[in-house]
Amino acid sequence: MMAIHRILQNMPLAPEDTGRLVAAYEATLQALGLADRSDPLTELVARKIVEIGQSGVRDPLQISKLAVTDLGAAP
């Protein structure tokens, strides 16, 4: 199970919100070059995606860009 799904399974989110966060997660992993889903960094990425999503940002690509920046990688 992907890190994002483990985190989201305990959160009361609408399906479209879950889909938006999963899309942002996937885009962020791709932007960071993280292909190995068992890499511990994927958990950090998932937590950052959820944090940004909870701040009110709704666009998956914007969430991804913010996550990449917040995690210290070049956009």
Image (spheres, grey):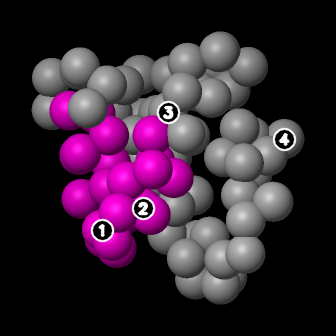
Q: Give the mark nearest the N terminus, 4 or 1.
A: 4
Gap in Å between the C-alphas at discs 3 and 4? 15 Å
- Answer with left or right where residue 59 lies relative to residue 44: left
Q: Is residue 75 visible?
A: yes
Name the amino acid type tagged 1: Val
Relative to 26, residue 42 above or below: above
Residue designated by label 3: 45
Gap in Å between the C-alphas at discs 3 and 2? 12 Å
What's the residue at 74%, 40% (across, down)?
Answer: 2
Q: Secondary structure at mark 1?
A: loop
Residue designated by label 4: 1
Q: Position of residue 65 (x, y in %)?
A: 23, 46
Q: Secondary structure at mark 4?
A: loop
- Answer with left or right where residue 8 lies relative to residue 29: right
Name the amino acid type tagged 3: Val
Residue designated by label 1: 57
Gap in Å between the C-alphas at discs 4 and 1? 25 Å
Relative to 17, residue 70 above or below: above
Q: Is residue 67 magenta?
A: yes
Task: Sort mark 4 into few (<14), some (14-19) or many (20+) by Cα contacts within 10 Å.
Answer: few
Task: Sort mark 1 into few (<14), some (14-19) or many (20+) by Cα contacts within 10 Å.
Answer: few
The quadrant of the image that shows the N terminus is top right
Residue designated by label 2: 53
Residue furthest left as drawn:
75
Name the amino acid type tagged 4: Met
What's the residue at 23%, 20% (across, down)?
Answer: 73
Gap in Å between the C-alphas at discs 3 and 1? 16 Å
Query: Given contact means CB atoms under 8 Å apart, are the residues at marks 2 and 1 in contact?
Result: yes
